[in-house]
Amino acid sequence: MYGLRSPVTAVLNGNVADIADFGRLIAGDHGLVVVSTLRDDGTVASSVVNAGVLPHPLTGATVLGMVIRGGARKLDHLRKRPYANVVARAGWQWAAAEGRAELAGPDDPMPGVGAERLRLLLREIFTAAGGTHEDFGTYDRVMLAERRTAVFVHPERVYANPGQ
């Protein structure tokens, strides 16, 4: 019933069918999702972040993107175990997307993503998550000062609750 595998899609309950539908569900709550990672002791760490669905900056594949503050525990977890589960909900509908995580940031260089591309990429993720900003110059300075990192989750599994 849950967890039908495909690189980007899964047949579910008719409410959430693929990562694009997952993105529409995220948009229903201003990009707020719960992201879960694994700690060193094997327990699960979860926190609320903003996320959006967008094309991967190098491959164009559809991914979930998040911007995470440098020094955050979840970033340490993802460096050691690059896999995440991301859950979104809108009303009684929820969906999860999980898969391999990839990092691009000042402490996590990604070949093909230099400093200028990273600056723009952080903006792209922010807006994909429903964010708006009146002064992107200030936004850029804060992202740089906080050593923000772009996190991409490649959806290997998408699943949801049964339809209501």
Image (spheres, rainbow, N blue to C red):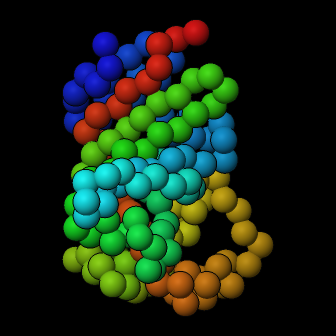
**Total numbered badges shown on the rendered structure:** 0
The quadrant of the image that shows the N terminus is top left
* Residue 62 in view: no
Q: Could one spot residue 105 in this view of the protein?
A: yes
Residue 122 x %, y %: 50, 71
Measured from the top left, where is residue 32 in percent x and y?
Answer: 60, 48
The residue drawn where x is 51% and y is 18% is 15
- Quarter occupied by residue 3: top left
What's the residue at 38%, 38% (across, down)? 97
The picture places residue 6, in percent across and down from the top left corner, at 22, 29
Q: Residue furthest front?
A: 41
Pick whichever, 87 or 103, lies toward us: 87
**Residue 94 drawn above or below residue 97:** above
Apparent side of residue 148 relative to residue 164 in the rendered image (left or right) = left
Farthest top residue?
Answer: 164
Residue in the picture at 41% in, 55% down = 45
- State whether residue 13 is above or below residue 104: above
User: Can you say which quadrant of the picture contains the C terminus?
Assistant: top right
Q: In this orientation, which residue lies closer to the viewer: 48 or 23?
A: 48
Please tell me whether residue 81 is drawn above or below residue 79 in the rendered image. above
Q: Residue furthest right?
A: 134
